């Protein structure tokens, strides 16, 4: 069957945008309003799996609850009469941060800062609502032109988010590893059930390291058990300057603190990390200072950085 003309409630698909292990995403148009949406459909083979369906619905619930300018908007979540599940999301035009990193632009600390402060703003709002994302990575950060910002950030995919309510406590089982290994904090590898917002801070640190070095990962691409163990016991996080990042010593140390294997030694909130990073980015002839970027595009971060609170969930 063609990817064009499939009907999901009031939406009709135009083209397929992408596919993953569990779902397919289409660009679609509302038949009455003419507006666009991204329709994310759970593949038929997964609809009989209660845990997968729960994860799919949880993505919609988490994002819909937050209603934040840096988190993709959820328009609807529906189970069709044939049992098929789909989510209608805000349609975004632009590129993933993964693609943008490949251009080399994020080696500029000011551009990395602009992206970081918005991503941190989204995560801070999520944490304040008791939601830990658990899969922060460049593929889940989308960049578009909105409200005069050429690098507006939308955080995507709350499908494995940890919701801080008792009725969802059983969704994450001890011993079940969920996330993307290269971005997962050591404690997330050990026991995903008891992680808190500091795991997202670690993932932000990995992402920022990747931006500043043009695509290098702080611990390399090896995700074997021996490498994971090394991360969990390491006392000295990698220095981005060792992989070609042209950043100041204070900025490098700010990133390294986010990568501390012991969560007690990290920045305790996304806002703390983003504010500290912005403080280390001076103005240039072409870009404002980091703090000016923060105040323009993520002003809430400044106030939130003064209060270190770690969501523990249930």
Image (cartoon, rainbow, N blue to C red):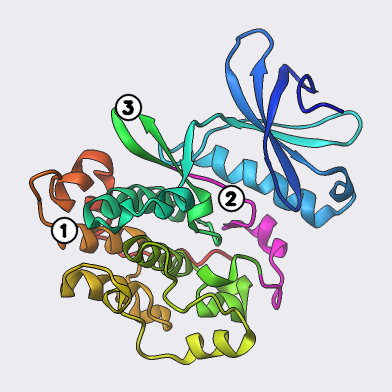
Q: In the rendering, at what x and y percent does residue 245 appear?
A: 27, 69
Residue closest to the eye, 60 or 6: 6
Front tag of 2 and 3: 3
How far separated are the C-alphas under marks 1 and 2?
30 Å
Circle on res. 158: 2
Within 10 Å of the Cα at label 1, are there few (<14), some (14-19), or many (20+) other Cα atoms? Answer: many
**297 relative position to 233: left or right:** left
Asked whether disc 3 touches disc 1, contact meaning CB atoms under 8 Å apart, the reply is: no
Front tag of 1 and 2: 1
Magenta highlight range: 154-177
> Does the image show residue 129?
no
The residue to which callout 1 is attached is: 281
What residue lies at 69% left-to-right and 27% top-to-bottom? 15
Picture quarter with the N terminus: top right
How far separated are the C-alphas under marks 3 and 1?
23 Å
Circle nearer the N terminus (1, 2): 2
Within 10 Å of the Cα at label 3, are there few (<14), some (14-19), or many (20+) other Cα atoms? Answer: few
Q: In the rendering, at what x and y percent does residue 83 appear?
A: 89, 36
Picture quarter with the C terminus: bottom right
The residue to which callout 3 is attached is: 147
Residue closest to the eye, 148 or 309: 148
- Rendering quarter of residue 57: top right
Q: Secondary structure at mark 1?
A: loop
Residue 13 among those drawn in magenta: no
**303 relative position to 155: left or right:** left
């Amino acid at each position: 069957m063609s990817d064009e003309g499939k009907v999901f409630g009031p939406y009709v698909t135009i083209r397929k945008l992408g596919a993953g292990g569990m779902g397919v995403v289409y660009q679609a148009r509302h038949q009455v309003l003419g507006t666009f949406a991204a329709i994310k459909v759970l593949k038929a083979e997964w609809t009989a799996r209660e845990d997968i369906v729960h994860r799919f619905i949880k993505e919609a619930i988490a994002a819909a609850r937050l209603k934040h300018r840096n988190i993709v908007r959820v328009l609807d979540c529906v189970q069709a009469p044939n049992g098929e599940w789909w989510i209608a999301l805000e349609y975004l035009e632009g590129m993933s941060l993964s693609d943008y990193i490949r251009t080399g632009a994020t080696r500029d600390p000011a551009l990395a800062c602009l992206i970081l402060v918005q991503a941190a703003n989204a995560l801070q709002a999520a944490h304040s609502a008791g939601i830990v994302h658990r899969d922060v990575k460049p593929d889940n950060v989308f960049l578009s032109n909105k409200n005069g910002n050429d690098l507006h950030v939308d955080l995507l995919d709350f499908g494995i988010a940890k919701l801080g309510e008792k009725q969802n406590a059983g969704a994450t089982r001890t011993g079940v590893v969920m996330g993307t290994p290269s971005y997962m904090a050591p404690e997330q590898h050990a026991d995903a059930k008891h992680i808190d917002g500091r795991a997202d801070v670690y993932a932000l640190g990995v992402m920022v390291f990747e931006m500043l070095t043009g695509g290098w990962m702080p611990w390399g691409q090896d995700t074997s058990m021996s490498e994971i163990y090394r991360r969990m016991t390491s006392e000295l996080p990698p220095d981005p300057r060792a992989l070609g990042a042209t950043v100041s010593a204070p900025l490098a140390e700010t990133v390294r603190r986010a990568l501390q294997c012991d969560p007690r030694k990290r920045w305790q909130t996304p806002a703390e990390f983003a504010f500290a990073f912005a403080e280390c980015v001076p103005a240039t002839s072409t870009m404002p200072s980091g703090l000016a970027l923060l105040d323009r595009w993520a002003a809430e971060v400044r106030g939130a950085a003064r209060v270190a609170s770690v969501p523990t969930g249930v």
